[in-house]
Amino acid sequence: MSREWPLWEIFIRSQHGLAHKHVGSLHAPDAEMAIKNARDVYTRRNEGVSIWAVRSSEIAASSPGEKGPLFEPASSKVYRHPTFFPMPDEVKHI
């Protein structure tokens, strides 16, 4: 059994942003402690409004080398691009 705590990836949503951004990693025994430690380490100036802590082992990612086969099929579907849809003035932050 490993004596090292699991690694957590930390994402913070700032007061001036709409999306969470990856800010770093830390070790913690559970999600609750990961969030508390992230608050202390990554939001020292009270700039965060939300914290996500995700176990690194639970993240699935594609490889940059797979970019072609992964994203090329989408380039032939130009109708999915947002330029084809007019956005009402009332809609913000899209």
Image (cartoon, rainbow, N blue to C red):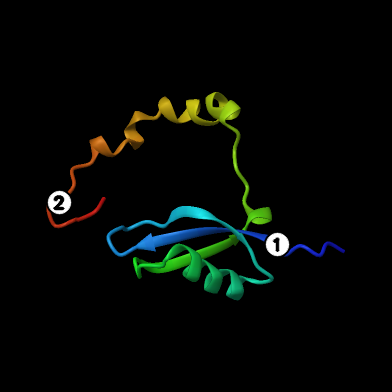
Q: Find the distance from the CA under tag 1 to the CA under tag 2.
A: 46 Å
The earlier-in-sequence mark between 1 and 2 is 1
| Amino acid bearing label 1 | Pro
Q: Residue furthest right?
A: 1
Residue 48: image x %, image y %?
37, 66
Residue 5: image x %, image y %?
72, 65
> Residue 46: which quarter of the image?
bottom left
Give the label, 1 or 2, closer to the camera.
1
Of residues 93 and 15, the one nearer the viewer is 15
Residue at the location (18% across, 47% down)?
87
Per the image, the residue denoted by label 2 is 88
Tell me: residue 33, above or below residue 17.
Answer: below
Left or right: residue 89 versus residue 68 is left
| Amino acid bearing label 2 | Pro
Of residues 69 and 2, the one nearer the viewer is 2
Q: Secondary structure at mark 1?
A: loop
Left or right: residue 2 versus residue 56 is right
User: How many numbered tags mark residues here?
Assistant: 2
Residue at the location (26% across, 50% down)?
94
> Residue 13: which quarter of the image?
bottom left
Question: Which numbered tag is attached to residue 72?
Answer: none
**Label 2 crowd bin: few (<14), some (14–19), many (20+), radius 10 Å:** few
Per the image, the residue denoted by label 1 is 6
Residue 6: image x %, image y %?
70, 62
